[in-house]
Image (spheres, rainbow, N blue to C red):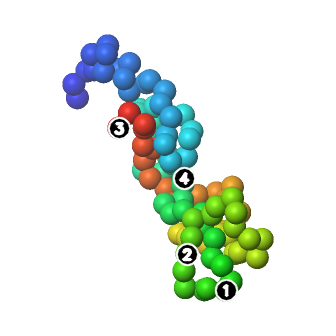
Amino acid sequence: MESLKGGERASLNQERVCKRCKKTFTQSSNSPSSCRFHPSFFVSRRHDDQKRYYELGPDDPPYAAKFYDCCGAEDPEAFGCKTDYHVSYDD
């Protein structure tokens, strides 16, 4: 195994922010199960039209069913349903 030069080692240990889950991470600790997120949008499905989906907006009526389109979780703060590597804003 090649030894890392100072700059490469520093880059692996530099803290970054994940653009999916917003947590800080380092490349050296990033693994396929590090990031937990929803791959889809939190949407609103209006009861008067069950076949059309809308992104949740500030003017959505209170009777709209709101959920994550990927897994059906109804809480906007629900724990993510998928895991993967963290993705940096720098990537």
Which mark identifies residue 69? none
Q: Nearer the viewer, residue 82 or 42?
A: 42
Which mark identifies residue 91? 3
Q: Nearer the viewer, mark 2 or mark 4?
A: 2
Q: Amino acid at mark 3?
A: Asp
Q: Secondary structure at mark 1?
A: loop
Q: Secondary structure at mark 4?
A: strand
- Check disc 1 and report the residue beneath it: 48
Cα distance in 3D space between marks 3 and 1: 42 Å
Cα distance in 3D space between marks 3 and 2: 31 Å
- Check disc 2 and report the residue beneath it: 53
Few, some or many C-alpha atoms within 10 Å of disc 3 (few <14, some 14-19, many ≥20)? few
Q: Amino acid at mark 1?
A: Asp
Q: Quadrant of the N terminus?
A: top left
Image spot of residue 62 (x, y percent): 78, 71
Task: Work out which residue is located at the far left of the displayed protein and give it.
Answer: 2
